[in-house]
Image (cartoon, rainbow, N blue to C red):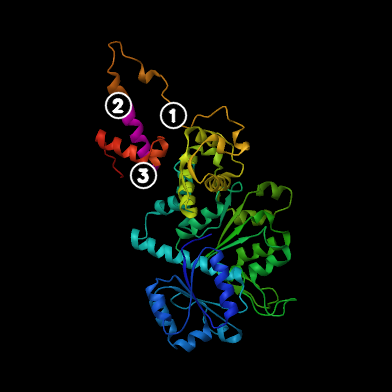
Amino acid sequence: MIGNGSIYIADNDVKTRDLVSAFLTYQGYDITVAEGSVSFFDTIQKNNVDIVIADLTYLQTVAPDFKEHILACNPLLVLIGYGETVAAEPKKPASDSIFTLPKPLNLDELESLVMRAREYQSMKMYDRSTGGSAPNQLLSSTMIGSSAPMQALFEMITKVAASNATVLIQGESGTGKELAARAIHQLSDRYGKNFVPVNCAAIPDDLLESELFGHVKGSFTGAYANRAGRFEMADKGTLFLDEIGDMKANLQVKLLRVLQNREFEPVGASKSQKVDVRIVAATNKNLEELVVSRDFREDLYYRLSVIPITIPPLRERREDIPILIHTFLTRFNADKRHAVKGFSRDSLGVLCNYEWPGNVRELENLVERLVILKGSGLIVPDDLPEKYLSGKASYSAPIQTFVPSSDNILPEGGICLNSAVDSFENNLIMQALTRSGGNKKEAALLLNLKRTTLIEKLKKKNLAFSEE
């Protein structure tokens, strides 16, 4: 769920208004419903509204020049309405901030537009605060990890985002493939356009074609009106095809044609439509093996995997586990108004030694469950579900220990132990700060210290860290 998105709904049709309000409230958005025309524009301006969802007839009644009034306040506008009235409105004017949806509403399409608006608004704020640069800041805020595999992934995403090439993201379930796809979109020059996700495994085969390409009125039973498909919704933006390995052979052929010709035909249509869409596909399956078994077209595979990206599983970047746990703990404590202080050293050790078949998603779900059940205090090994305790013998947290080597042999003339220990401690602190990019919270986690303790040590030792 996405929280704290401000949406204003205006519609005299009470059923539609209540349906949209209930649906988006469930999705985690902050909803305000228009109570009258007098305060309509004042409400938008004073409440810093991100999105206005309004019936076209209602707006025409409020003010003939409603577009200028609304867009001056900087939200995205979604016009809804029945029949030819709303269909006649331009879907993407020069402002690129007005979209239309016919009634009865398709909630999937509405949700996609709402997601686009949130991305659009957040990226504009991001541009204002950073001058449009600093992709590492955006990546680190959406994809958590300071390990070498994640740093390599961030570098690859940054390079890939600058092109329009088709990307194939591979990785196990729960590794964050959609997060990577969104990061590619947000760092590209398409970030102000739609990011449209489609889960190819979740939509029934007989409906997927219509979902992707849309349909015309009367093309099949139940097609009571023209409907835009995901390709049309993603025009000038990015289409994310998740679980592409589950797509059936007949749709693979049609997808290949779109990739080759940059055009598609809605179901039941006699004319093709041109489209400018960047494709980012993802799968947890081995497509090369599916090509060998002839369950996936070889030509489509090569079209999709122009640039392949692999998301590392959590077991291959265990040093990120404490940072992930801290991030999830902070979020769920705030969401659920609990006060779990943290995880004990032993419980962290157990979790760092677990194999994580469900990857980051499994870890996130576990932390949420523990916050709910524990409520407060420190989480210890006995609080963990039984399956995580199978490796209970190795409770040591993943922290490097001091081991004698040729670099720290006691000199013949002896040594000042206090100075040596102090120097060793200083070195570890500076390594932690370097690895975390100067983030004291993450550095403290790497050192198994409280953030306040680390800050006190820095002051006491007069240590300075340059973030160049």
Residue position marked by numbered label 2 in the rendering:
422
Discs 3, 2 touching: Cβ within 8 Å: no
Chief SS of the magenta region: helix
> On the image, numbered disc 3 is attached to which residue?
439
- Horizontal side, residue 2 vs residue 387: left or right: left
Q: Which residues are magenta?
A: 422-441
Q: Toward which corner of the image does residue 276 lie, by quadrant?
A: bottom right
* Residue matched to label 1: 400
As measured in the structure, the alpha-carbon distance from the residue carrying label 2 to the one carrying label 1 is 17 Å
User: Is 4 displayed left or right of 288 in the figure?
Assistant: left
> Which amino acid lies under the numbered mark 2 shown in the image of this protein?
Asp
- The amino acid type, in three-letter code, at marker 3 is Asn
Viewport quadrant of the N terminus? bottom right
Q: Residues within 10 Å of mark 3 (few under 14, many from 20)?
A: some
* Residue located at (61% from left, 79% from top): 103
At a point 40% along the width and 42% down the height, the residue shown is 442
Q: Is residue 398 visible?
A: yes
Name, please, the residue furthest toward the left. 462
